[in-house]
């Protein structure tokens, strides 16, 4: 099943009289359950493309669909509602709320969704177990390592059972060991839950995990292919 589609999308940013063409007519389709990497050098357009699919931005021209619904024309409130229902996000700098514990950070999307306390507790503990952080549930971000913070972010992204998880450079601030652990967890959760992962990266260590690699160059799709699943070695 097709979960995301981009049709001839452009994105032009204007600063005064200067125009920056971040995307120059990108088209692609993402199927349910994919584990896909958007790769390319800095400035290639991969983060911009991730933002369009994530309804964090709108194309200058072209169209974006999530589960068959055109989202490129939605207003701000409609996009926010769709993000809450269908999308989860993992950011390079973790984006955890510093005054909240790991438990409370994962719980936040469930609070916004109006779930009961019992439902929230069951879901949060299930997710913290999935990312091997049960014993760190009541630690704040400043009491956690970078790798642990990113695992909290993964659990939070999964909280509302989204259709797609979008990760922007998820290992950029992690050392090799923590980066591998984060990618192993994301791979396992993709296989166990079937949630679609799309991640932007330029890290060769991360790219090897992808089952599909889309290469962007100068705001255009240069290559769109598949590779063998990562073995975990």
Image (cartoon, rainbow, N blue to C red):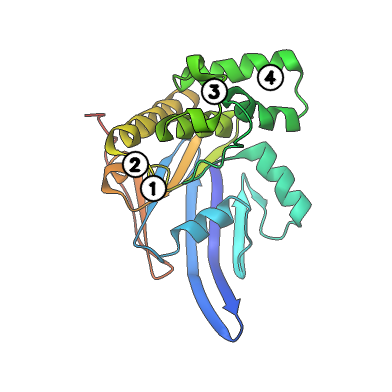
Q: Based on the displayed image, in which of its 4 quarters is residue 215 positioned? A: bottom left
Disc 4: which residue: 120
- Measured in 3D between alpha carbons, the distance from the residue under mark 3 to the one under mark 1, in whole angstroms, is 31 Å
Residue 1 appears in the picture as rendered: no
Which residue is at a point 60% across and 26% down the rendered structure image?
Answer: 101
Which residue is at a point 57% across and 37% down the rendered structure image?
Answer: 96
Residue 139: image tag: 3
Disc 1: which residue: 37
Q: Is residue 186 above or below residue 172?
A: above
Q: Based on the displayed image, in which of its 4 quarters is residue 160 positioned? A: top right
Question: Do labels 1 and 2 touch, CB within 8 Å?
Answer: yes
Q: Based on the displayed image, in which of its 4 quarters is residue 209 positioned? A: top left
- Measured in 3D between alpha carbons, the distance from the residue under mark 4 to the one under mark 1, in whole angstroms, is 31 Å
Which residue is more in the foreground, 223 or 99? 99
- Measured in 3D between alpha carbons, the distance from the residue under mark 3 to the one under mark 4, in whole angstroms, is 18 Å
Which residue is at a point 61% across and 37% down the rendered structure image?
Answer: 97
Q: In what element is the residue under mark 4?
A: helix
Q: Is residue 138 above or below residue 170?
A: above
The numbered mark, 2 or 4, whose residue comes first in the sequence reads 4
- Measured in 3D between alpha carbons, the distance from the residue under mark 2 to the one under mark 4, in whole angstroms, is 31 Å
Which residue is more in the foreground, 73 or 113? 113
Disc 2: which residue: 210
Label 3 or label 1, whichever lies nearer to me, is 3
The numbered mark, 3 or 4, whose residue comes first in the sequence reads 4
Question: Around disc 2, counting alpha carbons within 10 Å, would you say few (fewer than 14), some (14 to 19), or many (20 or more)?
Answer: many
Question: Around disc 4, counting alpha carbons within 10 Å, would you say few (fewer than 14), some (14 to 19), or many (20 or more)?
Answer: many
């Amino acid at each position: 099943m097709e979960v995301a589609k981009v049709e001839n999308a452009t994105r032009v940013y204007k600063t005064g009289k200067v125009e920056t063409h971040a995307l120059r007519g990108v088209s692609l389709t993402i199927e349910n359950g994919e584990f896909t990497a958007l790769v390319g050098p800095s400035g290639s357009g991969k983060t911009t493309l991730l933002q369009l699919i994530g309804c964090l931005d709108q194309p200058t021209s072209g169209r974006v669909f999530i589960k068959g619904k055109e989202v490129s024309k939605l207003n701000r409130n409609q996009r926010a509602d769709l993000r809450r229902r269908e999308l989860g996000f993992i950011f390079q700098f973790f984006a955890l709320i510093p005054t909240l514990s790991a438990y409370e950070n994962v719980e936040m999307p469930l609070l916004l969704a109006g779930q009961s306390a019992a439902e929230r507790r069951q879901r949060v503990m299930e997710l913290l177990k999935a990312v091997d952080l049960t014993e760190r549930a009541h630690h704040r971000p400043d009491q956690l390592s970078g790798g642990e913070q990113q695992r909290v972010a993964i659990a939070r992204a999964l909280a509302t059972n989204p259709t797609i998880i979008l990760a922007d450079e998820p290992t950029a601030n992690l050392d090799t060991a923590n980066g591998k652990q984060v990618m192993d967890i994301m791979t396992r959760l993709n296989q166990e839950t079937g949630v679609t992962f799309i991640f932007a990266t330029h890290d060769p260590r991360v790219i090897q995990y992808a089952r599909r690699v889309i290469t962007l160059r100068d705001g255009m799709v240069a290559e769109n292919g598949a590779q063998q699943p990562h073995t975990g070695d």
